[in-house]
Amino acid sequence: MAMNYNAKDEVDGGPPCAPGGTAKNRRPDNTAFKQQRLPAWQPILTAGTVLPTFFIIGLIFIPIGIGIFVTSNNIREIENPSKECEPYRRNEDKPIAPCGAIANSMFNDTLDLFLVGNESDPTPIPLKKKGIAWWTDKNVKFRNPPGADIPLEERFKGTTKPVNWVKPVYMLDPDEDNSGFINEDFIVWMRTAALPTFRKLYRLIERKNDLHPTLPAGRYYLNITYNYPVHSFDGRKRMILSTISWMGGKNPFLGIAYIAIGSISFLLGVVLLVINHKYRNSSNTADITI
């Protein structure tokens, strides 16, 4: 017995059926959904459409964000009592000024540097204690109690010193412009570090002129008045003499980060250039062959 076979039937509707039988058609129904003829929209992303979108979003969102930020900062909240200073909020039935664990642990060693020459008496090196804090911290963030005509001691009347301090906050410096809450040693210490090993700027040694070095060659003597114990938490203290540049003190991380990002970007650029050159040549060859 013979059977007719037509390849077109298999392509159109599947395997052939027996003679006299009903052919099964696997073709989807002729509807817009099954034949994928539904209307669709796909944006064409070009520089002319994407860049204006970013600029418009920026121009709209930045003023709105500034307005919300300023409005939020103008809101005043008073919490009585405040728990941020615990457990160093009160002592001897008086509020501690400044309160809190960070202020209580303020570094209070005294360092004096001397140049030892041929003479018997060493020459003290002037150490500048102003200019070590950020301008915004000194003039905006930290303020003393109001009353410019009132002595600083009177403005802190009714408060007591932190537990671990040797003297009260209004006696940190004889100069009232560098005493109290605006004392620059205190301001530097209150800017807490993110890691357990950190550096704090203690003093500045100014260079008199370009003809003479800041510290001439010679023997130096460092006198340390030890007030800050670290044995209880296995801490260490160091004094570091360092030069500075336009970017501040020694910080290799920023340079390494720039080198790494630049190298990765350059490498990706080379790889994309090679891929683009290879596939562009392949496309041109295919067009010629066709």
Image (tube, rainbow, N blue to C red):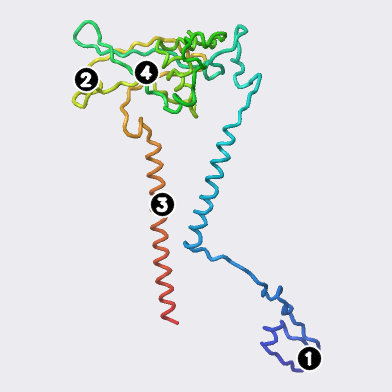
Q: CA distance from mark 2 to mark 4?
A: 23 Å
Q: Is residue 22 left or right of residue 37?
A: right
User: Disc 2 vs disc 1: Cβ atoms closer than 8 Å?
Assistant: no
Distance between the Cα atoms at labels 3 and 4? 44 Å
Return the disc, 3 or 4, that comes first in the chain's sequence.
Answer: 4
Q: Which residue is mark 1?
A: 19
Q: Earlier in the sequence, mark 4 or mark 1?
A: 1
Residue labelled with disc 2: 217
Marks 2, 1: nearer the viewer: 2
Q: Residue at x 54, y 12 (%)?
A: 162
What is the distance, in whole Å, between disc 4 and disc 1 at their CAs?
Answer: 107 Å
How would you rate the neighbour count of disc 3 (Cα within 10 Å): few for under 14, some for 14-19, many for 20 or more?
few
- As drawn, the residue found furthest toward the bottom would be 1
> In the depicted view, which residue is nearer to us: 23 or 147?
147
- Label 2 and label 1: CA atoms lie apart by 111 Å
Which labelled disc corresponds to residue 265?
A: 3
- Residue 280 vs 166, above or below: the answer is below
Q: Which mark is residue 268?
A: none
Q: Amino acid at mark 1?
A: Pro
Mark 1 lies on a secondary structure that is loop
State the image coordinates of residue 268 (x, y, percent, origin top left): 42, 55
Q: Label 3's element?
A: helix
Mark closest to the chain's N terminus, 1 or 3: 1
Q: Say which amino acid is labelled 3.
A: Ser
Q: Which mark is residue 129?
A: 4
CB-based contact (under 8 Å), mark 4 and mark 1:
no
The image quadrant that residue 113 belongs to is top left
Q: Above or below — where is 205 with respect to 10?
A: above
